[in-house]
Amino acid sequence: MALMRVRRAAQLTLPADVRRALNVKEGDYLEARIVKGGVLLKPVSVVERKRAWAGIKKVMSRVRDRSPQAREDSRTKEEAIAKEVKALRRKHA
Protein backbone atom coordinates (compact mmCIF):
# COMPACT_ATOMS: atom_id res chain seq x y z
CA MET A 1 0.00 0.00 0.00
CA ALA A 2 1.35 3.42 -0.98
CA LEU A 3 1.02 6.16 1.61
CA MET A 4 1.00 9.82 0.54
CA ARG A 5 1.03 13.04 2.50
CA VAL A 6 -0.76 16.24 1.52
CA ARG A 7 1.83 19.01 1.18
CA ARG A 8 1.68 22.78 0.87
CA ALA A 9 -0.85 23.97 -1.73
CA ALA A 10 -2.60 20.58 -1.45
CA GLN A 11 0.10 18.85 -3.50
CA LEU A 12 0.62 15.09 -3.47
CA THR A 13 3.60 13.10 -4.67
CA LEU A 14 2.78 9.75 -6.21
CA PRO A 15 5.21 7.09 -5.01
CA ALA A 16 7.58 5.73 -7.66
CA ASP A 17 5.95 2.28 -7.75
CA VAL A 18 2.53 3.87 -8.38
CA ARG A 19 3.95 6.09 -11.17
CA ARG A 20 5.55 3.06 -12.81
CA ALA A 21 2.37 1.00 -12.53
CA LEU A 22 0.31 3.80 -14.11
CA ASN A 23 3.08 4.69 -16.58
CA VAL A 24 2.83 8.39 -15.73
CA LYS A 25 5.63 10.89 -16.05
CA GLU A 26 6.10 14.52 -15.03
CA GLY A 27 3.61 16.72 -16.90
CA ASP A 28 1.06 13.93 -17.50
CA TYR A 29 -2.55 14.46 -16.47
CA LEU A 30 -4.58 12.38 -14.03
CA GLU A 31 -8.34 12.53 -13.68
CA ALA A 32 -9.48 12.57 -10.03
CA ARG A 33 -12.92 11.16 -9.29
CA ILE A 34 -14.61 10.74 -5.94
CA VAL A 35 -15.79 7.14 -5.55
CA LYS A 36 -17.32 5.23 -2.69
CA GLY A 37 -14.62 4.98 -0.06
CA GLY A 38 -12.01 7.25 -1.64
CA VAL A 39 -10.55 8.90 -4.71
CA LEU A 40 -9.85 7.22 -8.04
CA LEU A 41 -6.88 8.60 -10.02
CA LYS A 42 -6.90 7.70 -13.69
CA PRO A 43 -4.33 8.72 -16.36
CA VAL A 44 -5.86 10.63 -19.26
CA SER A 45 -4.60 11.81 -22.63
CA VAL A 46 -4.96 15.48 -23.37
CA VAL A 47 -4.49 16.77 -26.91
CA GLU A 48 -4.17 20.44 -27.75
CA ARG A 49 -7.28 21.49 -29.70
CA LYS A 50 -5.39 23.16 -32.60
CA ARG A 51 -3.12 20.15 -32.99
CA ALA A 52 -6.09 17.77 -32.93
CA TRP A 53 -7.94 19.74 -35.63
CA ALA A 54 -4.80 19.85 -37.77
CA GLY A 55 -4.65 16.06 -37.59
CA ILE A 56 -8.33 15.71 -38.44
CA LYS A 57 -7.98 18.05 -41.43
CA LYS A 58 -4.97 16.10 -42.67
CA VAL A 59 -6.91 12.84 -42.54
CA MET A 60 -9.99 14.48 -44.10
CA SER A 61 -7.91 15.59 -47.07
CA ARG A 62 -7.31 11.92 -47.91
CA VAL A 63 -10.95 10.87 -47.59
CA ARG A 64 -13.13 10.99 -50.69
CA ASP A 65 -16.94 10.86 -50.69
CA ARG A 66 -18.10 8.38 -53.32
CA SER A 67 -21.80 8.77 -52.63
CA PRO A 68 -23.99 10.31 -55.35
CA GLN A 69 -25.25 12.98 -52.89
CA ALA A 70 -24.37 16.64 -53.27
CA ARG A 71 -20.94 17.55 -51.89
CA GLU A 72 -20.77 19.30 -48.50
CA ASP A 73 -18.37 22.13 -47.79
CA SER A 74 -15.46 21.47 -45.40
CA ARG A 75 -17.04 23.48 -42.54
CA THR A 76 -20.16 21.28 -42.62
CA LYS A 77 -17.96 18.17 -42.63
CA GLU A 78 -15.92 19.48 -39.65
CA GLU A 79 -19.11 20.18 -37.69
CA ALA A 80 -20.40 16.67 -38.40
CA ILE A 81 -17.09 15.17 -37.26
CA ALA A 82 -17.08 17.29 -34.09
CA LYS A 83 -20.63 16.13 -33.33
CA GLU A 84 -19.59 12.48 -33.71
CA VAL A 85 -16.51 12.97 -31.51
CA LYS A 86 -18.64 14.57 -28.76
CA ALA A 87 -21.15 11.72 -28.96
CA LEU A 88 -18.37 9.13 -28.60
CA ARG A 89 -16.86 11.00 -25.63
CA ARG A 90 -20.24 11.07 -23.87
CA LYS A 91 -20.72 7.37 -24.56
CA HIS A 92 -17.31 6.44 -23.13
CA ALA A 93 -17.27 8.91 -20.21
Image: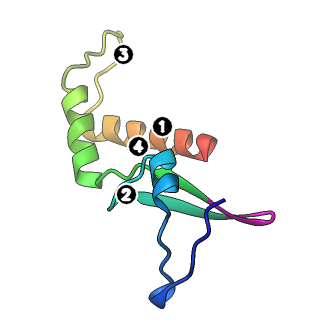
Q: In this view, does 19 lie to the left or right of 76?
A: right
Q: What residue type is labelled 2?
A: Asp
Residue lying at 25% horizontally and 16% vertically, measured from the top left: 64
User: Depth check: 66 or 7 in front?
Assistant: 7
Q: Name the residue under label 3.
A: 69
Assign a secondary structure to mark 4. helix
Q: Are marks 1 and 4 in contact (CB under 8 Å)?
A: yes
Q: What are the residue bounds of the magenta stretch?
A: 34-40
Q: What residue type is labelled 1?
A: Glu
Tell me how far mark 4 sits from mark 3, CA to CA.
21 Å
Tell me how far mark 2 sits from mark 3, CA to CA.
44 Å
Tell me how far mark 1 sits from mark 4, CA to CA.
5 Å
Q: In this view, does 52 lie to the left or right of 28?
A: left
Q: Where is residue 66 in the image (x, y as percent from the top left)?
A: 31, 9
User: Depth check: 82 or 70 in front?
Assistant: 82
User: What label does residue 28 carry, if any?
Assistant: 2
User: Depth check: 2 or 52 in front?
Assistant: 2
